[in-house]
Image: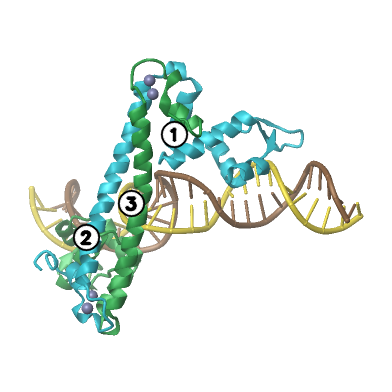
Chain colours: A green, B cyan, C yellow, D brown
Amino acid sequence: MYRIGELAQKLSVSTDTLRYYEKHKLLAATSRADNGYRLYNEGALRIMQFIIRAKAVGFSLKEISGLLSIKIDKASHSCAEVKSFTEQKLSQVNNKIAELACFKGSLELLVAACCGGEEEATHCSILSALENVDAIISK
Amino acid sequence: MYRIGELAQKLSVSTDTLRYYEKHKLLAATSRADNGYRLYNEGALRIMQFIIRAKAVGFSLKEISGLLSIKIDKASHSCAEVKSFTEQKLSQVNNKIAELACFKGSLELLVAACCGGEEEATHCSILSALENVDAIISK
DNA sequence: TTTGACATTGGAGTTAACTCCAAGCTTTAT
DNA sequence: ATAAAGCTTGGAGTTAACTCCAATGTCAAA
Ligand SMILES: [Zn+2]
Ligand SMILES: [Zn+2]
Ligand SMILES: [Zn+2]
Ligand SMILES: [Zn+2]
């Protein structure tokens, strides 16, 4: 059994994070010592690793909570369910990427058009593009 | 001069947004009517358009605030300054895209490996990948 | 004249995932 | 004996950009 600090160090997270996850029903301590200290077993360690990996893939804690309840009782859930969950996440990620790609494109245009010199910004194409609807397109 | 509701409608933003921007020093009303109503002139309209365009390009309100103070006194600032500001933003956007691309790649692997069938999720490759460090890589 | 639309203010609520804090235990080392 | 390190709790603070609210005032139309 690990005390909270040991588990935290093993996983490179903070003890606050562990307590936060407990408060938010993601992972409770396995038991408590006589003095009230939280104690975690290997199972808890593996669940934390699950959570950390799911986060690394982009799932939110709320979504991970959903995944955990499926994982706890796999027999009551189907592959279809898990896959559609994952596909939904993927499509969210794709949407965000598209939005950022749009930002990226605009910013690249702005950067390319600006001379970047040390003179006064009175003629700066970046500022005029933001002032003037078609400043970049019309060039 | 526009009242707040007129300007909001013209720009497709909420009146709350306009008041919020005022509170946060992005754009104050040009003046006040005798009854205390905010009044905005064409200059204010153009500044709002600047803000909206800058947002569309990915700048945060805080960053836009910086851009506005440059824009107000262009002669005291250089193209170099504006360009580096924009390049910084671009690099932030690129970092975010890279992170999301990483999520995307992992999620696609997960989705591809799962059969998506209606049977029990006991054998689901997505769940095992999240449980087991190398579940996907080892396949 | 009374409704309805519009405006004012200050301040609270939202979301996510922590992070920090104070006040107070327990344990271990010196 | 005491100090350091670790643990407990509840609760507040953080960030971004709004959004919503209540209580109240203004103005035009029917
Ligand atoms: Zn220039
Ligand atoms: Zn320039
Ligand atoms: Zn399957
Ligand atoms: Zn599956």
Q: Position of residue A136 (x, y in %)?
A: 43, 32
Asked if residue A57 shows in the view, the reply is yes
Q: Position of residue B53 (x, y in %)?
A: 48, 38
Circle 1: element type: loop
In the image, what residue type sits under mark 2? Ser
Q: Quadrant of the N terminus of chain A?
A: bottom left
Asked if residue A32 shows in the view, the reply is no
Q: Residues within 10 Å of mark 2 (few under 14, many from 20)?
A: some
Asked if residue B41 lies left or right of residue A14, the reply is right
Q: Which residue is mark 3?
A: A97
**Figure quarter occupied by ligand 3:** bottom left
Which numbered circle lies on residue A69? none
Circle 2: element type: helix
Up the image or down, B99 lies above or below A53; here it is above
Up the image or down, A3 lies above or below B90; here it is below
In the image, what residue type sits under mark 3? Ile
| Number of numbered labels in the structure image | 3
Give a yes or no on whether discs 1 and 2 share a subunit.
no
Up the image or down, B22 lies above or below B101; here it is above
Q: Position of residue A2 (x, y in %)?
A: 16, 66
Which numbered circle lies on residue B106? 2
